Amino acid sequence: MADMPDQSQLENAMLQSALGPASAETEGTRVTQHNLKDQIELDRYLASKQAAQKGGLGIILKKLSPPGAT
């Protein structure tokens, strides 16, 4: 499997895609980019996948005791 791009590379690619044309045609060759909504969903998926790999539960349990209690 190919190396996954890091977050900054992904953001730069999404920005370039958003700034460029949705499709282009020259000399009989037609190029169409992925939908921006699909790219945003991919970014969210990769961010959640990366967060899941960090470990931990994402929940902190603490014992609360009212002031003055011993």
Image (cartoon, helix red, strand yellow):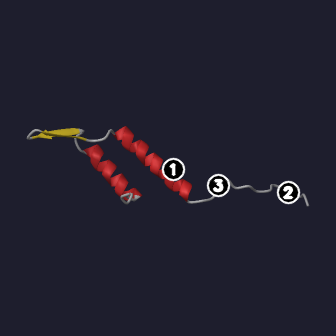
Which residue is at a point 31% across and 49% down the rendered structure image?
15
**CB under 8 Å between discs 3 and 2:** no
> Quadrant of the image for the C terminus?
bottom right
Q: Secondary structure at mark 2?
A: loop
Of the two numbered discs 2 and 1 on the same chain, state the one appearing first in sequence.
1
Of the two numbered discs 3 and 2 on the same chain, state the one appearing first in sequence.
3
- Mark 2 vs mark 1: give the one in front: 1
Q: Is residue 25 above or below residue 4?
A: above
**CB under 8 Å between discs 2 and 1:** no
The spot of residue 4 in percent (x, y) is 39, 57
Q: Secondary structure at mark 3?
A: loop
Q: Secondary structure at mark 1?
A: helix
Q: Amino acid at mark 2?
A: Pro
> Quadrant of the image for the N terminus?
bottom left
Q: Which residue is mark 3?
A: 57
User: Picture quarter containing residue 58?
Assistant: bottom right
Q: Which residue is mark 1?
A: 48
Relative placement, left or right, of 56 versus 53 is: right
The spot of residue 19 in percent (x, y) is 26, 45
Question: Which residue reaches farthest left?
Answer: 27
Q: What separation in Å lies between label 2 and label 1 (alpha carbons)?
A: 38 Å
Q: Amino acid at mark 1?
A: Ser
- Mark 3 vs mark 2: give the one in front: 3
Relative placement, left or right, of 59 versus 14 is: right
Q: Which mark is residue 67?
A: 2
Neighbours of disc 1 within 10 Å: few (<14), some (14-19), many (20+): few
